[in-house]
């Protein structure tokens, strides 16, 4: 159902508003360069700072452009179950192929509360759901036992795992079964994740290197791990650079160097430091994404 490379899309901004033209161009380029799917309004898309109207517009625009070409897995999570149901309902209405729902952040629910949260969303909206487990940002870890319980709900079909614990690919397969979709949420470990039984990656790096990231996924899914490793080596420095400061700051800066969009972020995030910019630029050169880019002059703070 959901396999291969899915890009966790950035949301381009310009003059404080969503830059729809840049977003459309980004989506079209992603499709052209071979991604298998797109994820609008995930946390990489700065969903916490999008208004409901903006959130709905970005999802609808992505579906409109991608429909029939690649799958769309719409970000629709929230730390409010009611809000998550509302956003997931819109995703279905807009024509998304599925919904990516992050673990509730800040509330710090326990395992039974997490189960009831996802169960309520799945019951309210009949759409394939991928659970997003990212303890580093949500502060809660959805345990294998809870995921295995949730896997019994028909429209909860998989998990995006950003725990960084590769052992969990195997332990979850034992408990939830091999048909429960496991997608990596970390570019750096995506190859190893697939070796252990994963079937894809929801990627930040693919915002700027979709062809290479898609090729790596294609090779791993064919079992050609040695060839995939060569691509991994080429991308490794880039993967690290994309998280040298809080994401999506580095990837937005990288996208701006490629002329894809402005590097603009919404508070409480700000443009990355000059030191981080140099790391990003160097990594892009190593990956062959830039020949000889010159860093733009630092803009004055206002």
Image (cartoon, rainbow, N blue to C red):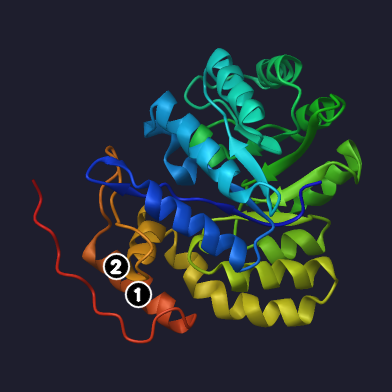
Residue in the image at 54% along x and 59% along y: 28
- Give me the residue at 66% from left, 28% from top: 92
Q: Residues within 10 Å of mark 2 (few under 14, many from 20)?
A: many
Q: Is residue 278 visible?
A: yes
Residue in front for this viewpoint, 58 or 110: 58
- Identify the residue under disc 2: 277
- Residue drawn at (77%, 31%), measured in percent from left and top? 147
Q: Which residue is at a point 32% across and 86% down the rendered structure image?
A: 292
**244 with respect to 302 (left or right):** right
Q: Measured along the vertical axis of the image, is residue 103 above or below residue 250? A: above
Residue on which disc 1 sits: 281
Is any part of residue 41 visible from this angle?
no
Q: Position of residue 50 (x, y in %)?
A: 39, 32
Say which mark, if any, is on residue 46: none
Structural distance between the alpha carbons of marks 2 and 1: 6 Å
Q: Position of residue 157 (x, y in %)?
A: 80, 36
Q: Nearer the viewer, residue 161 or 255?
A: 255
Q: Quadrant of residue 18?
A: top left
Nearer to me, 72 or 275: 72
Q: Would you say the residues marked 2 and 1 are in contact, meaning their CB atoms lie under 8 Å apart?
A: yes
Where is residue 83 drawn, in percent x and y?
A: 53, 17
Report the side of 146 relative to 135 (left or right). Answer: right
State which quadrant residue 53 falls in: top left
10 Å neighbourhood of mark 1: few (<14), some, or many (≥20)? many
What percent of the width, then of the height, locates residue 138? 52, 33
Q: Is residue 285 above or below residue 133?
A: below
SS at mark 1? helix
């Amino acid at each position: 159902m959901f396999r291969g490379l899915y890009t966790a899309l950035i949301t381009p901004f310009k003059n404080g508003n969503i830059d729809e033209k840049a977003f459309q161009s980004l989506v079209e380029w992603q499709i052209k360069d071979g991604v298998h799917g797109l994820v609008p309004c995930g946390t990489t898309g700065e969903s916490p700072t999008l208004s409901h109207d903006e959130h709905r517009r970005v999802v609808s625009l992505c579906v409109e452009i991608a429909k029939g070409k690649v799958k769309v897995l719409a970000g629709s999570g929230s730390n409010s179950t009611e809000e998550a149901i509302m956003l997931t309902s819109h995703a279905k209405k807009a024509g998304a192929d599925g919904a990516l729902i992050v673990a509730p952040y800040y509330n710090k629910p326990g395992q039974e509360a997490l189960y009831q949260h996802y169960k309520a969303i799945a019951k309210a909206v009949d759409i394939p759901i991928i659970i997003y487990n990212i303890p580093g940002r949500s502060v809660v870890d959805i345990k294998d036992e809870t995921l295995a319980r949730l896997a019994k709900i028909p429209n909860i079909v998989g998990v995006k795992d950003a725990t960084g614990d590769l052992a969990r690919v195997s332990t979850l397969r034992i408990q939830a079964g091999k048909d429960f979709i496991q997608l990596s949420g970390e570019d750096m470990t995506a190859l190893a994740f697939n070796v252990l039984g994963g079937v894809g990656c929801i990627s930040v790096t693919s915002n700027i290197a979709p062809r290479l990231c898609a090729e790596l996924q294609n090779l791993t899914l064919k079992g050609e791990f040695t060839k995939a490793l060569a691509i991994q080596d080429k991308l490794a420095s880039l993967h690290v650079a994309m998280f040298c400061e809080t994401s999506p700051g580095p990837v937005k800066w990288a996208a701006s160097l490629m002329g894809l969009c402005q590097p603009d972020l919404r508070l409480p995030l700000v443009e990355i430091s000059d030191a981080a910019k140099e790391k990003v630029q160097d990594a892009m050169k190593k990956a062959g994404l830039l020949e000889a880019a010159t860093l733009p002059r630092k803009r004055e703070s206002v």
